[in-house]
Amino acid sequence: MVLARRLGALAVTAAAALTLTGVPAQAAQAPIDVRLIAFNDFHGNLEPPAGSSGRVTLSDGTSVVAGGAAYMATHVQQLRTKNTLVFSAGDNVGASPLASALFHDEPTIDFMNDIGVNASAIGNHELDKGYQELLRKQFGGCASDGCQFEKSFKGAKWPYLAANMTFDNGLPAALPFTVDFSGGVPVGVIGVPLKDLPSVTSADAIKGLKFGDEVQAINKSADVLDKLGVKTIVVLLHQGDNTEGGGPNDCRTTPGPALAIAKAASPKVDVIFSGHSHQQYDCTVTDPAGNPRPLIQGASFGRLLSVVDLKIDPRTRDAIRGQTVAHNEVVTRDVTPDPTVQALVSKAVTEAAPIANKPVGTITSDIVAAQQPSGESPLGDVIADAQLESTKSAGAQVAVMNPGGIRADLNFKSSTAGVPDGTVTYANAFTIQPFANILQTETLTGAQLKAVLEQQWQPQPNGSVQTKMLQISSSLHYTWSASAPVGSRITSITVAGQPVTPDGSYKVTANNFLTGGGDGFTVLKQGTGIVGGAIDLDAFTAYLTAHQNLAPPAADRITQTP
């Protein structure tokens, strides 16, 4: 009830801000300059991210190291002008490195407070730990195991927004929008998570919540803002498109949901910051009234800042669309790191070190998450094998792993003082599997097992096919045909070397995200006789400890034919 009252108070605060929009328009006729700075998919990357996750590819194909909270804070400060607002398009936390995750991502919220974030969309990972934890992130208070990072946690100083998120009874579950003033004019900010959030989040985490159509929610909120006199409107959209390459300021997107939303959303919207797909692009999209507006995304992990400069007419208080300028700014590491943020990061890293630096295994070379043309991944093989080994006591014969749950590569590191070559630390393993999903073993028929594998190719509303290749244990082998129609691509399957029969019975291990139908694998919800197992990270670290000097497995489990 206390949290509900606080949410109501936040709504009253936003409503009070709206009443201020009735002040007389400024007499000066010169346009008002307002700068918007946004980032997306930070995922608690307080330290500079490593490897490819810490580089930005430029238009000419070269790359530059980027990211790190202290560097990002400096860049935000350097980009600030007289009238500046800072936003996030969601996934600030979740799937975070240990220095943030060990403390329930409270250091990341503190960092965002430090750089002056004005509002954030709710991303799917904001709900990884459920709605009540999201409220705690917003309003503060200690977690069930106490306050681990500071003596108290005050929560976010900025509102989380989700115009299309409701409770099952239809009532709003978050603020749909907020209003900030910059340069004397109101700027409306609408937050929107993807409507398909239930397919990428554990069913238990979002129990009691519904997610509606993005365009409908944007249009409804834009109409309300417009009637209240707020004419400059920004959308923080946690949905994005993929690209065919390009640099931070290229627009080489493939047609996807973000583009469709940007084309269809109300002409009252002036800017759309996107996220979720971790891509970089700077596009101009024509709205339904024929006017241009930016659709922009800044990769992930704090490597880019999306900057949009608006010219606002002081008489109408609306953005002059033809004078909007947008670009992505690289968060380079050649600037002086912000001392306040650096101190916060150092504290988090130092306090996490005893757990983070504990060796859990050794490897002989890099074991990467990247998939081969068949869909098989060396690291995916290892994780699936670890899950099978962990659940053999439950009778497991096969294990399958969702590729989106593998968040980084397992990189070989040269020896340092007292640490042998190829040492894998707990922090390394945690970065790869940060979700703490529970392994579950269930019984499927052979027909259901085949149907699960067929669901790796999922038809989309626009006629395209989205591919999500499960990573599989060494006990499972199958062949698929690239030319066969969706739903009939699997041509043979064996378990432990024996052909799978449609009416046969097979015990299959997967994490609770998958068994709940996550990533579109709805057939896994049909399993029977579910037996709970270990947390996936614990299974992974136990496997690494038991298999020292682990080498990348041979890629022989999935065979692709024409």
Image (spheres, helix red, strand yellow):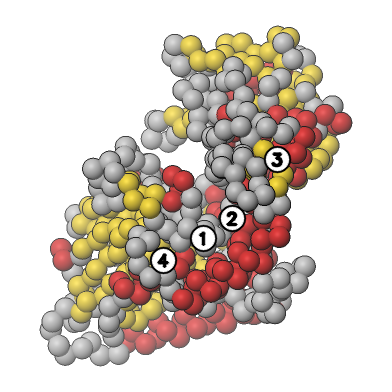
Where does residue 288 sit, x and y in percent of width and height?
A: 25, 54
Tell me the element at label 4.
Answer: helix
Residue beneath disc 1: 47
Q: Nearer the viewer, mark 3 or mark 1?
A: 3
Q: Is residue 13 above or below residue 326?
A: below
Which of the marked residues, 4 or 2, is nearer the chain's N terminus? 4
**Left or right, 260 with reference to 545:** left
Q: Residue furthest right?
A: 393
Residue at the image point whose x is 20% and y is 72% from the top: 311
Q: Quadrant of residue 9?
A: bottom right
Residue where numbered disc 4 is placed? 71
Residue 476: x and y in percent read: 68, 19
Q: Which residue is mark 3?
A: 361
Q: State the residue in front, 209 or 32.
A: 32
Label 2 or label 3, whichever lies nearer to me, is 3
Instruction: For label 1, count other residues whose C-alpha is less than 10 Å away and answer few (under 14), some (14-19) or many (20+).
Output: many
